[in-house]
Image (cartoon, rainbow, N blue to C red):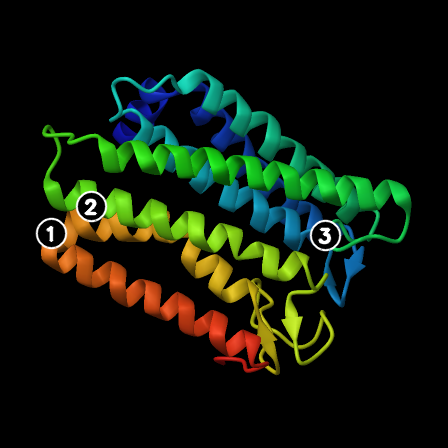
Amino acid sequence: MEFLSELKFRSPELFWFGLICLLLAFGLMLVSRFDTVQFLGISAYIKPIKFSLSTTLYAWTMAWFCFYLPQFNMKPFVWSTIILLGFEILYILVQAAKGQASHFNLSTPFYAVMYSFMALAASLVTIYTAYICLLFFKEPLPQLPDYYVWGIRLGMLLFVIFSFQGFAMGSRLTHTIGAADGGKGIPFFNWSITAGDLRIAHFIGMHALQVIPIIAFYVLKNTKTTFGLAAVYALVAFLSWYMAMRGKSPF
């Protein structure tokens, strides 16, 4: 509760946006128990659940970090995030309820345009995050431990790199390499266990935004080992991408 109270103080808008996304995810979990609509052999609501949870993590993490930048005007970033990611989640949810694809769907001109809008929304959020990452590299931030600052910098940098890795999926109109989308996958994430899956590296890299700063602050408490953690983490993400490109599953 203390964390949530501080988070609300740092950015009320992102706090509420993240909370709404979190409640939406739990609500959709309940809906999926009663609504049997499926897509590619699994509940169609799995995808909006995952995106809602991921958006909660992103919104709350950025609300926490941006507070450390005294000269940064948060309002444009906050409302850009809410509008762009809110649109993406809403469209994914609408398509899920119809049992239709949101991503890679070019079956009609309307769906093609909406898919392009989603790609644009995700790209704009990533570009804004890259700008904030640059600010963290430029600002000395003496009020924070050096290892924590570097955890934020490196985590955010990997987030940006592997967010743009999503174009590897968009250019192919598929996330599976070596098989069709929708084959056997691990529970909930549904990452392929029989072929390469580009979503694995995408997921690992993007969540460096949370993993590296948290471990740096609470566990490592050392700048050199924080760099080591980031290097190992980046290697794991890269190897996941490399295996996927070769059509291999790590599972």
Amino acid at the residue labelled 1 = Thr
Sooner in the amino-acid sequence: mark 2 or mark 1: 2
The N terminus lies in quadrant: top left
Amino acid at the residue labelled 2 = Trp
Disc 2 versus disc 3: nearer the observer? 2
177 w.r.t. 88: above or below: below
Q: Residues within 10 Å of mark 3 (few under 14, many from 20)?
A: many
Residue 199, numbered label: none
Counting from the top left corner in percent of width and height, residue 219 is at 14, 54
Q: What residue does disc 2 label?
A: 150
Cα separation between marks 2 and 3: 34 Å
Sooner in the amino-acid sequence: mark 2 or mark 3: 3
Residue 103, numbered label: 3
Whether pointer 2 and pointer 3 mark residues with C-beta atoms closer than 8 Å, the reply is no
Q: What residue does disc 1 label?
A: 223
Q: Image check: 113 left or right of 235?
A: right
The residue shown at (37%, 29%) is: 63
Q: Residues within 10 Å of mark 1 (few under 14, many from 20)?
A: some
Q: Image check: 197 left or right of 155?
A: right
Front-most of residues 12 and 125: 125
